[in-house]
Image: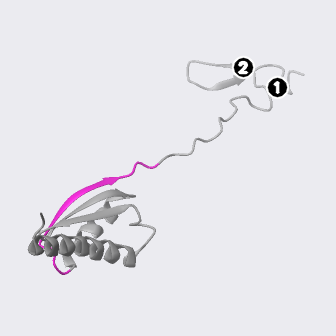
Amino acid sequence: MMRTNDLYRSQHNFETGIRVEDALLSIDQARFERVSAVAFCGIVELTGNVSNYYDKAQALRIARTVSGVTTVVESLQVRARTLVPRPAMSRRRPWSISGTRNSNQEWTASSRLDPSTG
């Protein structure tokens, strides 16, 4: 059986969590759309994903400024960026170069490419 005081506390905790989420979304909805806030007796836990460490630090700063928040527990994850693979570059050259390298690492062209040996 819930007492009136317990009901007030649970409603107050819910409202504190909502105020923190609203404060984050009012700053930038795209950056903090995956962040959730759960409150209990003034202690707020931030969970979810952010794209970089700056956003993580800013979310903590914003949560601390909300009224009713005494402590912020951070459980945010920084999302690993997914790299889009580039298409493999062809290692073949459009023309063929034949020749050898001498001991000084200089390229010596074959007679096919040397116009003077014609």
Label 1 Cα crowd, 10 Å radius (few <14 / some 14-19 / many 20+):
some
Against 45, is 22 above or below?
below
- Tag 2 residue: 99
Identified by mark 2, the residue type is: Gly
Quarter of the figure with residue 59: bottom left
- x%, y% of residue 20? 27, 73
* Location of the N terminus (image quadrant): bottom left
State the image coordinates of residue 11 (x, y, percent, origin top left): 21, 73
Residue at the (11%, 73%) spot, across then down: 70
Q: What is the spatial separation of the Cα atoms under label 1 and label 2, in whole angstroms?
A: 9 Å
Which of these two is toward me, 36 or 60? 36
- The amino acid sitting under disc 1 is Leu
Part of the protein shown in magenta: 67-81
Q: Earlier in the sequence, mark 1 or mark 2?
A: 2
Q: Which residue is mark 1?
A: 113
Helix, strand or loop for disc 2: strand
